[in-house]
Amino acid sequence: MNYRLVHGSVKHKLAWSSPIESTSFDPVLVTLAEGLKETMHPYAFVARQGFVELLQIPNSGVKTLPVLSKIIAPIRTALSHSDNNVSRSWTYCRISLNVFSG
């Protein structure tokens, strides 16, 4: 993957090794969507934050539409997860997906 986790004293963030706008959504967005079911740090944070950051780049819709069918199954898995933290992570990501879809 072309990102890494930067541990801050208060807040964590992702550092992208190349411009995020040039990131290929297949397989990165698909992998991050699959990670939404994770419950352990840092996996849960990376999946949630990376998913949101990719959807927030300008014109992300053009890159998201071709992989939309690939991220539906992982999203359903996250929605049906018994852990409430996974459900909250998905809710956070859903806001970005709603903004993307208009």
Image (tube, rainbow, N blue to C red):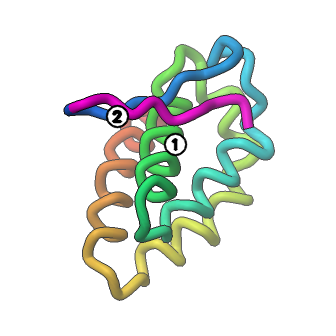
User: Image quadrant for the N terminus?
Assistant: top right
Q: Is residue 43 above or below residue 81?
A: above
Earlier residue among tags 1 and 2? 2
Residue positioned 71% across, 29% down in the render: 2
User: Quarter of the image holding residue 61?
Assistant: top right
Q: Is residue 83 left or right of residue 69?
A: left
Residue 17 coordinates in the image, percent (x, y): 68, 19
The kind of residue on which mark 1 rests is: Phe
| Residue at which label 2 appears | 12
How far apart marks 1 and 2 lie (CA) works out to 15 Å
Residue positioned 70% across, 15% down in the render: 18
Q: Is residue 72 left or right of residue 8?
A: right
User: Quarter of the image holding residue 90?
Assistant: bottom left
Residue 34 coordinates in the image, percent (x, y): 62, 63
User: Image quadrant for the C terminus?
Assistant: top left
- Assign a secondary structure to mark 1: helix
Residue furthest to the bottom: 82
Q: Is residue 70 left or right of residue 78?
A: right
Residue furthest to the front: 9
Residue furthest to the left: 10
The kind of residue on which mark 2 rests is: His
**The residue stretch that appears in magenta:** 1-9
Residue positioned 43% across, 40% down in the render: 49
How many labels, in total? 2
**The stretch drawn in magenta includes residue 22:** no
Give 80 or 6, whichever is nearer the viewer: 6
Residue positioned 52% across, 74% down in the render: 76
User: Quarter of the image holding residue 66?
Assistant: top right
**The stretch drawn in magenta includes residue 3:** yes
Residue 51 numbered tag? 1
- Assign a secondary structure to mark 2: loop
